C-alpha cells in the first residue's frame, strides 16, 4: 500500500478513538441534565446507546473517506503518475553492495571484417551506456565507486581500450579493468559510457564453450554476453549490428540468460529491419537485440548470432 493509504487509515482510526474519548463524558453529562428523574442505570444505558450510534456514524464516515482515498490513489497511479520507484529498485537499494543501482545498461556492439595478410579479421566495437542512480554521495576521490572490466576469451584476446566519458584509472596494465572517476549526491542520476575493441581471426573454431552456461558454439556462429557480477540492473539491453555484415539470430531462441549454477534460459531475440524493399542498405542492414528486466548480480545475458 502507498503512503497515502496508510495515512488515511491512521487518520480514520485516530478520529474514531478521539471522538469516543471526547464524546462519552459529554453525552453522559447531557443526559443527566435532561433526565434527572430517571434512575442512574437507565441514564447510563441511554448514554451508552447514544455513544454507540455516534461511533457507528463516525466509522461509516471514516470508512467512506478511506475507500475514496484508496480509489483516488489507484486512479492517480494508473492514469496520471506511474510508480517511479519499482519494487525491484527498492530491493536493490537495500541489498546493493555498490554505491549505486543501474537503472539501465545498453550495450551496442558493432561488427566489421577486414583482410589482414590474406586472412579475414573481425573487429568488434563494444560501447556500453550506463544510467546510474546514486545511493549515497560520491566524490572523485572514491576511485573504486564504479569499476568496469572487459573480458578476454579463448578466441578473443585482451581488448583494445576505448576511452569513454569519464576519467579512468587503470587497475591492470592493458586497461581491460579500470575504475571511473565519478561524483554526485545521493539520488543523482548519472550517465557514463565505456567501451572496448576486439580483433580476432575468422573463421572461429568449432566446439567452443561459453564461460557461463556451457553453451556449445560452432565455427559459423558467435555470441556477445554481458557478465554481471555485482550490480542490480533494472533494464539491460544488448544490440548487435553491422553496416557491412548481415547479422542474424542463431535460431528461434538465440537470446540466453544464465544465473549462478543454473542451466541457461533461452528466448527469441528481436530483429530490427526496414520494411522498405527499395533501398539496398535497408535490405542488408539488420540489428539483433534483446531486453532483460530486473537483472540481479551473478547473471550472464547474451545473444548467439550468425552472419552472412
Image (cartoon, rainbow, N blue to C red):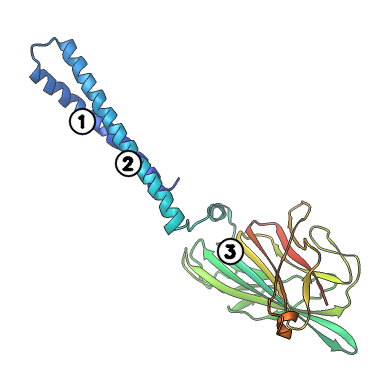
Instruction: Report the label total.
Output: 3
Q: Earlier in the sequence, mark 3 or mark 2?
A: 2
Q: Earlier in the sequence, mark 1 or mark 3?
A: 1
Q: Secondary structure under badge 2?
A: helix
61 on left or right of 40: right
At label 1, counting other C-alpha atoms closer than 10 Å, the crowd grade (few under 14, some 14-19, many 20 or more) is: few
Mark 2 touches mark 1? (CB < 8 Å): no
Disc 3: which residue: 102
- The one nearer the camera, 129 or 248, is 248
At label 2, counting other C-alpha atoms closer than 10 Å, the crowd grade (few under 14, some 14-19, many 20 or more) is: some
Q: Secondary structure under badge 3?
A: strand
Nearest to viewer (mark 2 / mark 1): 2
Q: Picture coordinates of residue 241 (x, y %)?
A: 72, 76
Disc 1: which residue: 22
Nearest to viewer (mark 3 / mark 2): 2
Disc 2: which residue: 65
- Which mark is drawn over residue 77? none
- The one nearer the camera, 285 or 13, is 285
Residue 164 higher or lower than 20, as above or below: below
Q: Picture coordinates of residue 78 (x, y %)?
A: 46, 54
254 on left or right of 135: right
Amino acid at each position: 500500500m502507498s503512503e497515502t493509504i496508510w495515512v488515511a487509515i491512521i487518520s480514520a482510526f485516530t478520529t474514531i478513538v478521539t471522538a469516543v474519548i471526547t464524546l462519552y463524558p459529554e453525552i453522559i453529562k447531557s443526559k443527566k441534565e435532561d433526565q434527572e428523574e430517571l434512575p442512574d442505570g437507565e441514564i447510563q444505558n441511554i448514554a451508552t446507546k447514544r455513544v454507540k450510534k455516534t461511533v457507528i456514524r463516525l466509522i461509516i464516515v471514516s470508512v467512506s473517506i478511506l475507500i475514496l482515498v484508496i480509489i483516488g490513489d489507484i486512479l492517480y497511479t494508473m492514469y496520471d503518475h506511474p510508480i517511479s520507484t519499482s519494487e525491484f529498485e527498492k530491493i536493490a537499494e537495500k541489498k546493493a553492495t555498490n554505491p549505486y543501482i543501474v537503472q539501465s545498461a545498453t550495450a551496442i556492439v558493432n561488427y566489421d571484417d577486414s583482410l589482414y595478410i590474406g586472412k579475414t579479421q573481425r573487429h568488434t566495437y563494444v560501447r556500453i551506456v550506463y544510467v546510474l542512480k546514486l545511493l549515497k554521495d560520491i566524490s572523485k576521490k572514491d576511485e573504486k565507486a564504479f569499476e568496469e572490466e572487459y573480458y578476454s576469451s579463448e578466441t578473443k584476446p585482451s581488448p583494445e581500450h576505448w576511452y569513454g566519458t569519464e576519467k579512468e584509472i587503470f587497475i591492470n596494465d592493458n586497461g581491460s579493468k579500470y575504475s571511473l572517476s565519478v561524483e554526485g549526491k545521493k539520488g543523482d542520476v548519472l550517465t557514463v559510457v565505456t567501451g572496448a575493441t576486439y580483433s580476432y581471426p575468422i573463421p572461429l573454431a568449432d566446439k567452443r564453450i561459453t564461460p557461463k552456461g556451457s553453451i556449445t558454439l560452432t565455427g559459423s556462429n558467435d555470441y556477445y554476453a554481458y557478465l554481471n557480477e555485482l550490480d542490480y540492473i533494472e533494464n539491460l539491453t544488448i544490440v548487435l549490428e553491422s553496416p557491412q555484415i548481415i547479422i542474424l539470430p542463431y535460431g528461434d531462441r538465440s537470446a540466453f540468460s544464465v544465473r549462478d549454477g543454473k542451466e541457461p534460459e533461452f528466448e527469441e531475440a528481436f530483429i530490427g529491419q526496414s520494411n522498405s524493399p527499395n533501398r539496398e542498405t535497408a535490405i542488408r542492414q539488420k540489428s539483433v537485440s534483446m531486453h532483460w528486466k530486473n537483472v540481479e548480480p551473478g547473471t550472464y545475458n547474451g545473444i548467439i548470432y550468425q552472419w552472412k
